[in-house]
Amino acid sequence: IGSDSIYDVCDRRVRVAGRLVDEGMAVRPEEEELREEYASEESYGDEKLECEEWLRRFAEGKELKYYCYRLPDVIGPYENTGRLYGYYIWIKHSDVKRVQLDRVSQTRPLSFVYSLDLCDNILDVLRRTKSEPDLVDKIHGKSFNVCFSETPTLKELLEIMAKNQETELKWKDPSGLADVFLPSTECGAISDDLARTLLGWKSSPLADALKETGDFFARAINWSGKERRKALKKLPKKLRKQIEDQYE
């Protein structure tokens, strides 16, 4: 299981404006200097791509069969980065400090994936290999983007969450200096066409997945634990100081 962060260490010149990032764009730059620059900027994506490259070499001439998922930011129960959870808490308290985004977050389409959709697809592929013997060869050695069919901006995503929470979301004017914590990559929205064709990938409606995730956060917010601490640390320091006594 890999990440769409690998595209941040690939040759950005192959991307086409207005086109979703697809698997064929996962090509490192030929120039060594550029490779090193991108790798130093995005060590996580560099390591994820190295894993794919190692698997490819290791499987040559062997009976080992594999395929890779490339995940954008994950939402869903037990998501543990604190990013979406942090925004869930901020929305609850936007009357204390208004939510502020940078200007890019108002307009840039993004991709997300629902953890339960991923689990369903893994199990479905395993089941299908028994009834479709040729499926293994069709997907062997390939990498697949998986995501929602919708590509919301961060602003749109938070508006859906606020609606689900039945909370008025208060905004501060956008700023070029706002500290946003989604997305975790810079590549933008990705295409899941290949996964839909070969893996039978199906994604839940984004609003439904956000509702399930929000309902989980509503329960989990009363639990102590590192996930809640991570989420609180994502918040602006001023807001965190004003509300943290509610989450001790």
Image: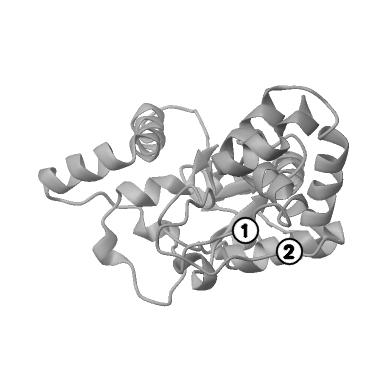
Amino acid type, callout 1: Val
Residue 118 position within the rendered picture, expressed as x and y whole percent measured from the top left? 69, 45
State the mark number for residue 99. Answer: 1
* Residue 191 position within the rendered picture, expressed as x and y whole percent measured from the top left: 52, 64
Side of 240 where 220 appears, left or right: right
State which quarter of the image contains the N terminus. Answer: top right
Q: Residue under label 2, please give it.
A: 169
Residue 193 shows which numbered tag? Answer: none
Q: Residue 99, image x and y in percent?
A: 62, 58
Asked if residue 142 lies left or right of residue 120, the reply is left
Q: Nearer the viewer, residue 26 or 137?
A: 26
**First in sequence: mark 1 vs mark 2:** 1
Q: Quadrant of residue 154?
A: bottom right
Q: Is residue 38 above or below residue 172?
A: above
Q: Say what amino acid the circle numbered 2 marks.
A: Leu
| Count of marks, rendered view | 2
- Cα separation, mark 1 vs mark 2, equals 8 Å
In the rendered view, does 243 fall on the left or right side of 177?
right
Give the quadrant of residue 115.
top right
Residue situated furthest bottom in the rendering = 18
